[in-house]
Image: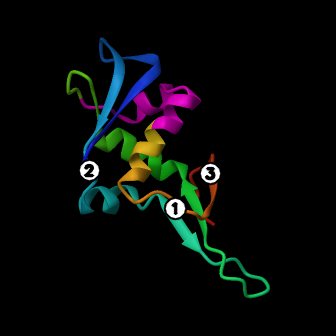
Amino acid sequence: MSGTVKLRKPVEWHKEEVTEVSFREPVGKDLIQCGTPLDMYLPEGDGEELKVARVNAGCIAKLIARCGSSQSGGALGAGFVEKLCIDDFNACQNEILAFFGGPDEAETKTSSTGTTH
């Protein structure tokens, strides 16, 4: 399984104008290095079994850099991810989450700091 995102705002990266990012499926080594992109937990409270998925933006950024490549097959890096506009970051995030089955029907909260709570 793989996915491709056409960037709304191309990014200049290593003398290439990147207009598309293709993703390979993450493997175990990627998760060891980057962590898992979704933190699932049951909130404390009145005992309801509402699952909450919290998206770990820091992990997502690492997985975009590690599993993504430009339209010419060039490797990406953290600096590339930092240049993405919000819409393109979100589109790439959705491609990464698709490998994990996405947040399903759980409530999703995106962390801008990439830290987990």
Q: Residue at x 61, y 48 (%)?
A: 113
Residue 88 lies left or right of residue 27; in this view the side is right
Q: Is residue 14 above or below residue 82?
A: above
Q: Residue at x 62, y 51 (%)?
A: 110
> Which circle's residue, 1 or 2, is located before the other in the chain?
2
Q: Residue furthest front?
A: 105
State the SS at label 1: loop
Amino acid under disc 1: Asp
Question: Of discs 1 and 3, which sits in the foreground?
Answer: 1
Amino acid under disc 2: Glu
**Circle 2 residue:** 25
Are the two marked residues, 1 and 3, in contact with CB atoms closer than 8 angstroms? no
**Circle 3 residue:** 110
Amino acid under disc 3: Thr
The percent position of residue 3, horizontal first and vertical second, equals 31, 40
Number of marks in picture: 3
Q: Is residue 102 above or below residue 94?
A: below
Which quadrant of the structure image shows residue 6? top left
> Which circle's residue, 2 or 3, is located before the other in the chain?
2
Q: Which residues are magenta?
A: 75-91
The percent position of residue 29, horizontal first and vertical second, equals 25, 59
The quadrant the C terminus occupies is: bottom right
Mark 1 residue crowding within 10 angstroms, few (<14) / some (14–19) / many (20+): few
Mark 2 residue crowding within 10 angstroms, few (<14) / some (14–19) / many (20+): some
**Circle 1 residue:** 104
The percent position of residue 2, horizontal first and vertical second, equals 26, 44
State the separation of the CA atoms marked 1 and 2.
19 Å
Residue 20 lies left or right of residue 103; in this view the side is left
Q: Residue furthest bottom?
A: 47
